[in-house]
Amino acid sequence: MSRRPRRLRDFDYRGLHRYSLTICTDRRSLVFVKPSIVNAAIDQIQQSASAHAFAVIAYCFMPDHVHLLVLATSETSDLRAFAQSVKQRTAYHYKQSHATTLWQKGYYEHVLRNDEATLATAKYILENPVRAGLVAKPRDYEFAGSFVLAAEQLDELWQCDAEALRDVGLVGTP
């Protein structure tokens, strides 16, 4: 039996915040290995982001989980509602063609603090396939990207080191 990750006790999860999310597949099944499955999930995440006022700065679909770096764009943005929508939409569409459960219960979130650079976190997320040995360079991984950063911006991001991102004033920038 899997337990749901605990949320921060004294944090509302509403308003203009940045979050790093990790959502794992049911039984850590290797689901996100086909472009058709990933593209369908991306479409549903885009719809959820639009409906709940979130910008997806970075996403990375690993075979058995997905990482999302999101930025709330409204004082009424609610991470819990957004995450529920993402899981519900993607699970529904996945089940239509695969007749199995997509996600395990819950999700993991990290609220980015003011001293954590958004783009440094994006870079870390987008480099997951390199650390996992799936590709040699982040740009070679087809299941990672951004809904707000252009390909040229991602190329620049991958060439910067974390210290350079901090030096250009991106620390704490939503």
Image (tube, rainbow, N blue to C red):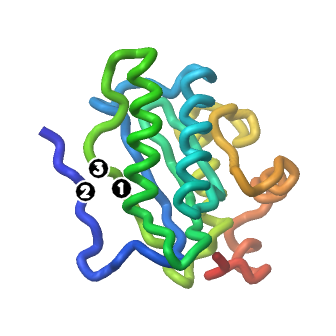
Q: Position of residue 90 (x, y in %)?
A: 46, 35
Residue at image location 42% in from the left, 53% down from the top: 83
Mark 3 or mark 2, earlier in chain? 2
The residue that label 2 is drawn on is 5
| Labels 1 and 2: the sequence-earlier one | 2
From mark 1 to mark 2, how far is it between C-alphas?
Answer: 6 Å
- Whether residues under marks 1 and 3 lie with C-beta atoms below 8 angstroms apart, the answer is yes
Q: Is residue 24 above or below residue 97?
A: below
Q: Position of residue 3 (x, y in %)?
A: 17, 49
Look at mark 3 in the image and give the residue it sits on: 106
Q: Which mark is residue 108?
A: 1
Q: CA distance from mark 3 to mark 2?
A: 6 Å
* Mark carried by residue 142: none
Q: Marks 1/3: CA distance?
A: 7 Å
Q: Quadrant of residue 141?
A: top right
| Residue sitting nearer the eye, 171 or 70 | 70
For marks 1 and 3, give the one nearer the viewer: 3
Q: Amino acid at mark 2?
A: Pro
Residue at coordinates 37% horizontally, 40% vertically from top-left?
24
Say if mark 1 contacts mark 2, CB within 8 Å.
Answer: yes
Q: Quadrant of the N terminus?
A: top left
